[in-house]
Image: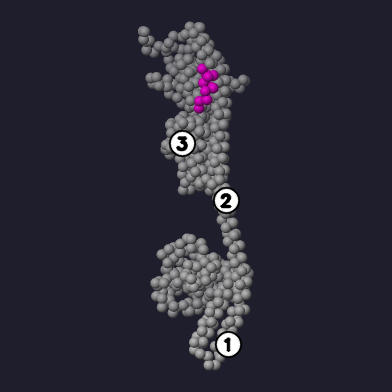
């Protein structure tokens, strides 16, 4: 076979062969439109077919799509490797030109309008860099292409759009089914959602996705953060809490948002919204469960308070009788020493029992507070006087840090002293080997703060959750009733204040009691 001279193209086909080639071209264009290829792949293959049929050096298409204009070009490039370009422009930036002979100003370029009915839809341009111009026979054949080409573009666009919407709806339906399943952990839900995402994008074989939320992250194998990426924030109650990311692992031509379609932007935003709603619903369920636990706890405390008040009133009368008769018996003349000692034990036990009853009544709020103008520094000074000797005996260094400019408050001094003594005694008992006990007072906006801090054993989180519950104690049997901190909490709350505790095992504890300048009634 004799080689063709350089720069020469194949000779134009004979009339019959040309007609057959033209018929094959039209059939191939319609076939390509029905194959279901991604838009960029279809346009590239379409231009390659037109390039080969027209024996051109460059083929270009320009047509509107929504609010943008799609522009694609295929050139022969160097050697046999074609160069393909695809981009989207704003509508109105360019316009299609007519295919009338008067506008075909150069024999090396053909411009042909594409139309759907009466509406101009775009332009096909075929160019030869030089050498042989388009002959009249070639122009006559090529002018028959636009009608079929317009039909193929419209058909492929409709088929492609339908297929993409089906993929997107299938993905969203799958996500809805996943998040509705009860009992799944965060990791499981995110992993299943990530597995659904690649198939919804236009290049599923080279698509990878990842979802990050809080301390959780799930990603498809091969996910790379440096690839062509599309992302959307996961927003929960107006706050961005995570990210949905989709990447193409191979370079793809730009269309709308890089290689991603405008519809894919809507899809990833909807996926992020669905994940955000799922998180919001879970957190709402957790918050509801927490409030229900608090409600049950409050109901339990109310029941315990009612029982405690009833028991206290029932015990007061027999305790008063026991205490009274024991004191009378001790005054009897000629009482043996052993009997006097036994009666003293009865009196002390009765007094201890009466103190427990009094604490139960305070816990149940059956004893009204006698509120008046009170000096918290004075309450602290008088209360610490009672424990100074004990602290010195047990090797505890007692430190005072009282604000001399402390504001006065409206409160029951006796109950405030009980709060102080309970907290101080707890601190002393937390330091059996000695340590430091610090008492502070200071002003705070609208109130005052009393702090009791020890350097003792401290408490873990589980203990901290229980310390204000009645009858909860870490002391040995017979060493405490478990009512001290419950009584403290009741007194502080009745004064309209709050109590907070900070503690860490091995590093001691600090109780902060904040009281308003005026009680809840006065306020």
Q: Are marks 2 and 3 in contact (CB under 8 Å)?
A: no
The circle on residue 328 is 1
Residue 7 in picture, x, y percent from top left: 39, 13
Q: Which residue is mark 2?
A: 285
Kindly identify the residue that appears in the image at 52 percent across and 76 percent down: 379
Looking at the image, residue 251 lies above or below residue 417: above
Disc with the residue nearer the chain's start (2 vs 3): 3
Disc with the residue nearer the chain's start (1 vs 2): 2
Query: Mark 3 and mark 1: span between their CA atoms?
Result: 91 Å
Q: Which residues are magenta?
A: 28-38
For mark 3, give the secondary structure. strand
User: Could you say which quadrant of the image residue 508 lies in?
Assistant: bottom left
Looking at the rendered image, the quarter that the C terminus falls into is bottom right
Residue 392 in picture, x, y percent from top left: 41, 77
Query: Mark 2 and mark 3: span between their CA atoms?
Result: 32 Å
Q: Which residue is mark 3?
A: 208
């Amino acid at each position: 076979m004799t080689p063709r001279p350089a720069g020469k193209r194949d000779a134009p086909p004979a009339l019959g062969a040309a007609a057959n080639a033209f018929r094959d071209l039209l059939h191939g264009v319609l076939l390509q439109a029905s194959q279901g290829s991604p838009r960029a792949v279809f346009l590239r293959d379409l231009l390659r077919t037109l390039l080969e049929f027209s024996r051109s050096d460059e083929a270009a298409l320009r047509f509107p799509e929504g609010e943008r204009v799609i522009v694609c070009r295929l050139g022969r490039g160097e050697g046999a490797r074609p160069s393909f370009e695809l981009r989207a422009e704003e509508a109105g930036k360019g316009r299609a030109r007519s295919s009338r002979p008067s506008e075909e100003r150069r024999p090396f370029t053909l411009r042909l309008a594409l139309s759907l009915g009466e509406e101009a839809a775009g332009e096909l341009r075929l160019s030869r860099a030089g050498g042989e111009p388009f002959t009249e026979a070639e122009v006559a054949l090529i002018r028959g292409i636009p009608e079929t080409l317009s039909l193929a573009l419209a058909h492929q666009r409709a088929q492609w759009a339908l297929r993409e919407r089906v993929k997107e709806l299938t993905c969203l339906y799958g996500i809805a089914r996943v998040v509705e399943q009860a009992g799944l952990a965060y990791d499981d839900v995110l992993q299943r959602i990530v597995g659904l995402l690649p198939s919804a994008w236009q290049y599923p074989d080279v698509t990878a996705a990842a979802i990050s939320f809080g301390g959780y992250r799930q990603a498809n194998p091969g996910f790379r953060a440096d690839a062509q990426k599309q992302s959307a924030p996961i927003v929960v109650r107006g706050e961005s809490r995570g990210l949905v990311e989709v990447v193409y692992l191979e370079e793809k031509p730009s269309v709308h948002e890089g290689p991603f379609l405008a519809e894919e932007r809507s899809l990833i935003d909807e996926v992020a919204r669905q994940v955000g709603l799922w998180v919001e619903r879970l957190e709402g369920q957790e918050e509801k469960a927490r409030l229900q636990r608090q409600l049950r706890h409050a109901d339990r405390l109310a029941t315990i308070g009612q029982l405690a008040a009833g028991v206290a009133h029932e015990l007061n009368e027999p305790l008063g009788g026991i205490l009274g008769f024991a004191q009378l018996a001790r005054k009897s003349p000629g009482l043996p020493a052993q009997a006097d000692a036994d009666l003293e034990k009865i009196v002390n036990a009765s007094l201890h029992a009466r103190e427990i009853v009094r604490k139960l009544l305070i816990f149940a709020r059956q004893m009204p507070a006698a509120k008046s103008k009170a000096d918290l520094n004075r309450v602290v000074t008088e209360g610490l006087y009672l424990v100074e000797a004990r602290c010195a005996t047990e090797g505890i260094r007692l430190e005072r840090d009282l604000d001399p400019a402390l504001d006065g408050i409206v409160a029951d001094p006796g109950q405030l002293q009980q709060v102080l003594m309970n907290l101080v005694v707890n601190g002393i008992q937390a330091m059996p080997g000695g340590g430091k006990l610090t008492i502070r007072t200071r002003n705070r906006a609208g109130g005052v703060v009393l702090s009791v801090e020890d350097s003792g054993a401290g408490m873990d989180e589980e203990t901290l959750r229980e310390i204000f519950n009645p009858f909860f104690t870490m002391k040995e049997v017979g060493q405490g009733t478990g009512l001290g901190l419950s009584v403290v909490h009741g007194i502080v709350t009745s004064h309209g204040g709050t109590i907070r505790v900070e503690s860490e095992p091995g590093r001691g504890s600090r109780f902060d009691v904040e009281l308003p300048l005026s009680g809840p009634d006065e306020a």
